[in-house]
Image (cartoon, helix red, strand yellow):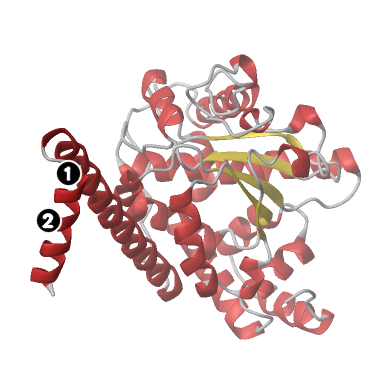
Amino acid sequence: MATVPQEAINELQALMDRVDEPLMRTFENIHQGYLKETLVRFLKAREGNVAKAHKMLLDCLKWRVQNEIDIILSKPIIPDDLYRAVRDSQLIGLSGYSKEGLPVYAIGVGLSTFDKASVHYYVQSHIQINEYRDRVILPSASKRYGRPITTCLKVLDMSGLRLSALSQIKLLTIISTVDDLNYPEKTNTYYIVNAPYVFSACWKVVKPLLQERTRKKVQVLPGCGRDDLLKIMDYSSLPHFCKGEGSGSGRHTSYGPENCYSLDHPFHQQLYSYIKEQSQRRQPIQPIKQGSFHVALPEAAAEGTEIAKTIESELQKFETEVGCLTHWMALKSMASEAVGIKMLRTTICSDESNKS
C-alpha cells in the first residue's frame, strides 16, 4: 500500500503507548525518535491492518528482549581474523548515499560463500549491520539532510551466481526471515545488477510469488547498472562493482580502498571499532569473550518457505539441464573424434525412443 491513513497510525500509537518496560525501552531503540515512520513501516508490512501490525510489532519487541538485541552492538566477533573471514565470505558494505540522502548498501549475492564460520556468526553479523544502520547511519543521515531518513537502497550484485547457491538457501532464508519479521520496510528499492541466466530463470518464477509492494521495489538493471544508478547517486557513491562499463565481479577484481565489502573499507572499520568500543564500555575490566552471539533462529513464513522451495526447484531443474547439455557435448566430442557426428545423433535418437 502506498499510503497509510493517519487514523491507522493514531490507533497503533495508542496501542503502543500501553507497552511497559522492557518492551518500551527496546521500542525506543527501534524508532530512534522517528515514531510515526516506524509505525508506518509495520502498518505497511501488514497491509494497513492495525491489529496485525500491533501483533507484529509486539512479537518483534519480544524477540529483541529475549535475544538481547539491544546489546548486540557490544558483542564483537573475535578474534579479528575470524571477523575478516566473515567479511570475506558475507559480502556487504556501505558504498555511499543517494542524492536524496538514503544509504546505499552493496551486497555480493553471487560471490558470498558463507563457508568460513558457523551460521550463528553470519546471523550475528547481519543483525549488527542492521542495528548499526538503524541506530547510527540513518540517524546521522537524518541530521545531515535535515529530514527523517529511515530507509536505504540496496544494490545486489549477482556476479558469480552459481548452482552452488543451492546450499546457501537455508541460511539466506533465515536472514531474510529475520529482516521480514523484525526490520520490515527498511529497504526503499532493490537494484539487481550483473544478473546471469540462472538468476533470470529463477526470477521469472519467483516474481509472481512476491507481494505487490515487494515486486515494485525490485529493479533489474542491464549490465553493471552504472548508467541507471548514476541517475540517483553520484559516481563516488556507486558500489565498486558498478564503476566499470560492463558487468564485473565484486570480489576477485582488485578495487583497493573502494571495495566496500572489505574489512579495510572505512565503513567496516568504523563499524568494527564502534562494536569494540561499546563492548569496552559495558565490560571495561573483563576481557572480551570469544564465541558467537546466539540469536533464536526464526521459522520462515509460509511465503518465504514457498519462495525458497521454488528457487531450489528451479536451480535443480537448471542443474539437470546443464548436466544434460554437458553430457551431450561430451558425447558429441567423443563421437566426432571416433565415428562422426551422424552416429552420435542416431545414438541419441535411439536413447530417447527407448526412454519413451
Q: Of callouts 1 and 2, which one flags the residue occurring earlier in the amino acid sequence?
A: 1
Circle 2 packing at 10 Å, graded few (<14), some (14-19), many (20+), is few
Query: Residue drawn 63% across and 16% down?
Result: 257
Which quarter of the figure is the C terminus placed in?
bottom left
The residue under label 2 is 347
Amino acid type of the residue that numbered disc 1 sits on in the rendered structure? Leu
Which x, y percent locates residue 198? 43, 51
Query: Residue drawn 29% across and 39% down?
Result: 118
Which x, y percent locates residue 229? 75, 42
Q: Nearer the viewer, residue 194 or 118?
A: 194
Alpha carbons under labels 1 and 2: distance apart: 10 Å
Note whether residue 188 is visible.
Answer: yes
Residues marked 1 and 2 touching at CB (< 8 Å): yes
| Mark 1: secondary structure | helix
Task: Give the answer, above or below, for where 125 lies relative to 256.
Answer: below
Which numbered disc covers residue 299? none
Q: Nearer the viewer, residue 51 or 179?
A: 179
Residue 121: quarter of image: top left
The residue under label 1 is 331
Amino acid type of the residue that numbered disc 2 sits on in the rendered structure? Thr
Task: Give the answer, above or below, for where 93 lies relative to 175.
Answer: above
